[in-house]
Amino acid sequence: MSWELVVKNKFAAAHFLEHYKGKCEKMHGHTFEVEAHFKVDTLNQSGIGVDFTELKNYLKEILPDHKVLNEVYDFSPSAENLSRYFFYKIKEKYPVSKVMVWESDYAGAVYFED
Ligand SMILES: [Zn+2]
């Protein structure tokens, strides 16, 4: 038996893509949506794998709300790089299986380990 728990949150931030030619080389903003998936195979007596409240609080804590992402991170803050960064950050505490970062309603990146 296994379950995948999902929590999501949003943050607003500015970024630009480094070493890139195109409209995203200029500073612009997004409301990013982050979805974190957790794999659990046992439930406690309440029927809970990992408490959603705990997961949501932790996700909120690590999201860089109202920041300039290029000043916060030492990598080019693409959706791909952000999803990988959040994945390993969450993995320090919880059994994360994948992290998805949406830059808009139509485009995003998912990071998971092969
Ligand atoms: Zn962008």
Image: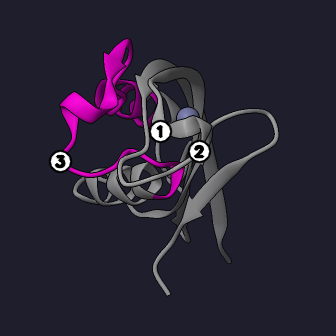
Residue that numbered label 3 is attached to: 74
**Identity of the residue furthest to the right in this view:** 106
Task: Specify the label residue 22 is tagged with.
Answer: 2
Residue that numbered label 1 is attached to: 25
- What kind of element bears circle 2? loop
Q: Residue at x 50, y 58 (%)?
A: 80
Within-10-Å neighbours for mark 2: few <14, some 14–19, many 20+: few
Please state which amino acid type lies under the numbered disc 2. Answer: Gly
**Identity of the residue furthest to the front in this view:** 21
Q: Residue at x 37, y 54 (%)?
A: 19
> Label 1 to label 2, Cα distance in Å?
6 Å
Mark yes or no: residue 47 visible.
Answer: no
> Label 3 to label 2, Cα distance in Å?
21 Å
Q: Residue at x 62, y 52 (%)?
A: 5
Instruction: Return the x and y of residue 105 as percentages of the image width and height.
Output: 79, 34
**In contact (CB < 8 Å): disc 1 and disc 2:** yes
> Label 1 to label 3, Cα distance in Å?
16 Å
Instruction: Return the x and y of residue 37 as percentages of the image width and height.
Output: 57, 55
Instruction: Return the x and y of residue 102 as percentages of the image width and height.
Output: 65, 41
Please state which amino acid type lies under the numbered disc 3. Answer: Asp
Q: Earlier in the sequence, mark 1 or mark 3?
A: 1
**Residue range highlighted in magenta:** 54-80
